[in-house]
């Protein structure tokens, strides 16, 4: 790897900061060298004796923690790449892109920064995703800045794609901006390579997993309209729905606002019906299978990432592939919007309102 002089100078600048706590946010479009720079900085700060943490807020090309999560690790040994820093804690967002999940991404990032502070880390490096374009990218980075309150921002830029963020942040007296050019040696990765990276991360995780048979009486399903809102009694469905639809074949129905989600073994051909000013959305249990989920404790802390295998409503069971930890039974199953097969091949992402 070639370390450009200006990268070395930026690291030196940050090294000279002698405050007891300093947070460094690294921002840039995709393939601009963010992660490489974070690794370089983390090693230098660790070598200089600072207790250094790295928060990896890139949901897709995650080095610390699995894709779909925001991971945080503390540097304890020399490493070649950031992925060697063990993940100590993670926040489950549930997708491999922040689009449609901006709130979850900023919340999770802030919580992981707070974790690092609670571990008495003195230097916190925040690696971010490459979404900087348009209103979503701008909004995500702007609100990350507001919540994390970094002391330093490293901005890796090719063609002024960070201009509107820079124009704002350079007004602040609290933060120091270090603009850096993207070295020509930074390699650009295509869609397939990015997908393979995510799959490889899950394929390395799956051997640690086994089938967990969760009782729906004991865990709460969340972030899916299934089970959210008011349970609609069978007699009410009988009264409201056309007689051509037999409610006896339904497993359950929940009204949330003007929408009613009906879980059924098979769905009417229309899929969605509008009856009585309500939108009836029919879903089958298999739509909730092969979905990446967060197994959370009652406080919402991520215990493990899992992949749903079978939703058996009759037996009130959800089978999930996840590492088994005797001491921590999950209390909440938080549905993500990323689907993979049980062997780790990517199926795709789901729209936010898909489940
Ligand atoms: N200074 C450098 N010299 C040589 N290669 C580099 C340098 N910086 C980055 N690279 C290579 O370029 C590629 C992209 O770099 P990196 O992963 O750091 O970028 P990124 O901005 O974090 O990408 P992403 O948007 O996917 O998170 C990697 O293969 C990395 O090894
Ligand atoms: Mg990166």
Image (cartoon, grey):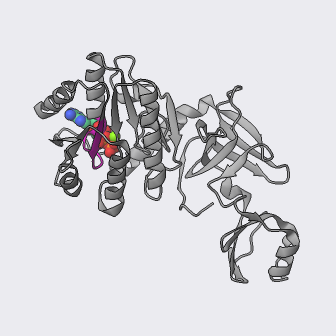
Q: Residue placed at 29% from the left, 33% from the top?
A: 38
Pick the residue in front: 197 or 9: 9
Residue found at the very far front of the displayed protein? 173
Residue 49, above or below 203: above
Q: Residue placed at 64% from the left, 57% from the top?
A: 224
Residue 69, given in percent of the width and then of the height, sits at: 49, 41
Q: Is residue 21 left or right of residue 327?
A: left
Pick the residue in front: 157 or 11: 11
Q: Quadrant of residue 243?
A: bottom right
Q: Which quarter of the rendered image does ligand 2 occupy?
A: top left
Residue 214 sits inside the magenta stretch: no
Report the magenta residues as a range: 24-36
Task: Classify the position of the C terminus by image quarter.
Answer: bottom right
Residue 17, given in percent of the width and then of the height, sits at: 21, 27
Residue 176, given in percent of the width and then of the height, sits at: 19, 40
Q: Residue placed at 50% from the left, 50% from the top?
A: 95
Residue 246 visible at all: no
Residue 247, given in percent of the width and then of the height, sits at: 85, 72
Q: Quadrant of residue 49?
A: top left
How many numbered circles does the render carry? 0
Q: Is residue 348 left or right of residue 10?
A: right
Q: Is residue 8 left or right of residue 287?
A: left
């Amino acid at each position: 790897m070639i370390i450009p002089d200006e990268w070395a100078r930026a690291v030196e600048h940050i090294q000279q900061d002698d405050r007891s706590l300093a947070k460094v946010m690294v921002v840039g479009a995709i393939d601009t060298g963010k992660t490489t720079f974070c690794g370089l900085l983390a090693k230098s700060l660790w070598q200089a004796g600072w207790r250094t943490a790295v928060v990896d807020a890139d949901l897709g090309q995650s080095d610390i923690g699995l894709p779909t999560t925001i991971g945080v690790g503390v540097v304890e040994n020399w490493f070649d790449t950031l992925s060697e820093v063990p993940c100590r804690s993670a926040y489950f967002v549930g997708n491999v892109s922040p689009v449609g999940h901006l709130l979850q991404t900023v919340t999770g990032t802030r919580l992981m920064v707070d974790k690092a502070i609670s571990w008495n880390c003195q230097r916190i490096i925040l690696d971010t995703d490459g979404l900087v374009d348009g209103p979503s990218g701008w909004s995500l980075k702007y609100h990350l800045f507001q919540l994390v309150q970094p002391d330093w921002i490293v901005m890796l830029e090719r063609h002024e794609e960070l201009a509107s963020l820079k124009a704002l942040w350079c007004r602040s007296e609290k933060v120091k901006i270090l603009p850096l050019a993207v070295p020509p040696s930074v390699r650009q990765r295509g869609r397939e390579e990015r997908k393979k990276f995510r799959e490889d991360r899950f394929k390395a995780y799956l051997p640690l997993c086994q089938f967990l048979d969760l009782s729906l009486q004991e865990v709460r399903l969340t972030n899916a309209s299934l089970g959210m809102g008011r349970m609609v009694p069978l007699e009410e469905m009988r009264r409201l729905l056309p007689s051509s639809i037999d409610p006896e074949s339904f497993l359950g129905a929940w009204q949330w606002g003007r929408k009613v989600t009906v879980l059924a073994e098979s769905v009417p051909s229309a899929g969605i019906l509008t009856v009585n000013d309500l939108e009836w959305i029919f879903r089958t249990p298999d739509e909730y299978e092969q979905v990446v989920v967060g197994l959370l404790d009652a406080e919402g802390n991520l215990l493990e990432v899992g992949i749903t295998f079978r939703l058996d409503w009759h037996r009130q069971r959800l089978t999930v592939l996840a590492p088994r930890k005797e001491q921590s039974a999950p209390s909440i199953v938080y549905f993500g919007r990323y689907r993979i097969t049980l062997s780790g091949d990517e199926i795709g992402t789901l729209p936010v309102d898909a489940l």
